[in-house]
Amino acid sequence: MTNIEKFWKAILIVKPNTQLTVHGNITSEEDFNNNIKWSTGVAENGIAITTTTNPHSEITWTAVKAEMDKL
Amino acid sequence: MALTRLGLNQSINLASNVTGTLATGNGGTGATSFAPGKILQTVTSTITNSTESTTSASFVASSLQLNITPSATSSKILIFVIGGQAYVDANAERMHTTIYRDSTNLGDSSRGLANYSTNSAKPSVPHSMLVEDSPSSTSQINYRCYYDSDGGGSVYWGTGSMGKMTMTALEIGA
């Protein structure tokens, strides 16, 4: 299992059905803070409305990394 | 234009039997207008070593895009996207991919232009999209690839760690 596959499994364990987009890989807290866009809604033309600010308090790098390390 | 009379069954030698200048209206030097169907310009964009992934159920922008400025409002734009690898995680049912012209989806509003489904064999297949657009504009247009996940799991767009993915736009004279 690749690192990015572990990341996705971990995210969906920490909070199922979370909608986010990753450009590149997530191997550090810096990646976690910079490489993710969080979906918060959808515009009329079908494009996701996103933010770089994590709106999910329960999804932290510490929590995600802990789940990744179990995989 | 001067012409040489040819004998029976004599083929035309363009180097010696034809003189003069082809009228610009017929495509000669300096022509500014062309017969329908001619390719007026091409624009290509490529990505390599790019992995992008999402669980978003709405379309998110990929990094693959290009800009083109049509030379006439009557032109058609033919867009190809090919290569790379599309991968759908077992937790997702499928990935939808599409192309937006600026903010307009050129595919189906929910399913886009191409779909990739889950397979227990862990498929990784090349992306492939083709669409013809009539933008009716001579302003710069942005065409960009978008993708989403159907089913809640993660889907992967791009090339992964290898390969190359290309997006090409052809302007076709009307």
Image (cartoon, helix red, strand yellow):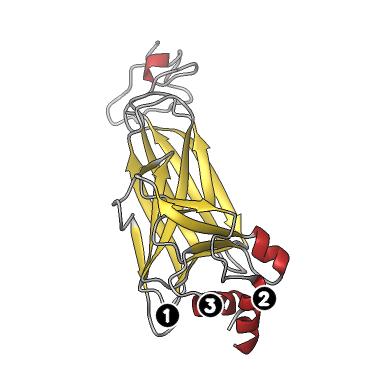
Report the Cα–Cα distance between label 3 and label 1.
Answer: 18 Å
- Residue at 45 percent across and 17 percent down: it is B31
Residue B71: percent from the left, percent from the top? Answer: 44, 24
- Residue at 53 percent across and 77 percent down: it is A14
Kindly state the secondary structure of the residue where label 1 is placed. Answer: loop
- Point out which mark residue A14 bears: 3
Q: Nearer the viewer, residue B45 or A34?
A: A34
Foreground label between 1 and 2: 2
Task: Tell me the chain of label 1.
Answer: B
Of the image marks 2 and 3, the number of the one nearer the N terminus: 3
Amino acid under disc 1: Ala
Relative side of B50 to A16, left or right: right
Asked whether disc 3 touches disc 1, contact meaning CB atoms under 8 Å apart, the reply is no
Q: Residues within 10 Å of mark 2 (few under 14, many from 20)?
A: few
Residue A13: percent from the left, percent from the top? Answer: 51, 80
Q: Quadrant of the N terminus of chain A?
A: bottom right
Kindly state the secondary structure of the residue where label 3 is placed. Answer: helix
- Residue at 56 percent across and 79 percent down: it is A10
Q: Is residue A10 above or below residue A47?
A: below
Residue B86: percent from the left, percent from the top? Answer: 46, 67
Asked whether disc 1 touches disc 2, contact meaning CB atoms under 8 Å apart, the reply is no
Report the Cα–Cα distance between label 2 and label 3.
Answer: 11 Å
Relative side of A40 to B11, left or right: right
Amino acid under disc 2: Thr
Give the residue number, with chain letter if any, for mark 2.
A62
Give the residue number, with chain letter if any, for mark 1.
B90
- Residue at 34 percent across and 47 percent down: it is B131
Q: Nearer the viewer, residue A3 or B85?
A: A3
Q: Residue furthest top?
A: B1
Q: Nearer the viewer, residue B71 or A21?
A: A21
Amino acid under disc 3: Val
Q: Residues within 10 Å of mark 3 (few under 14, many from 20)?
A: some
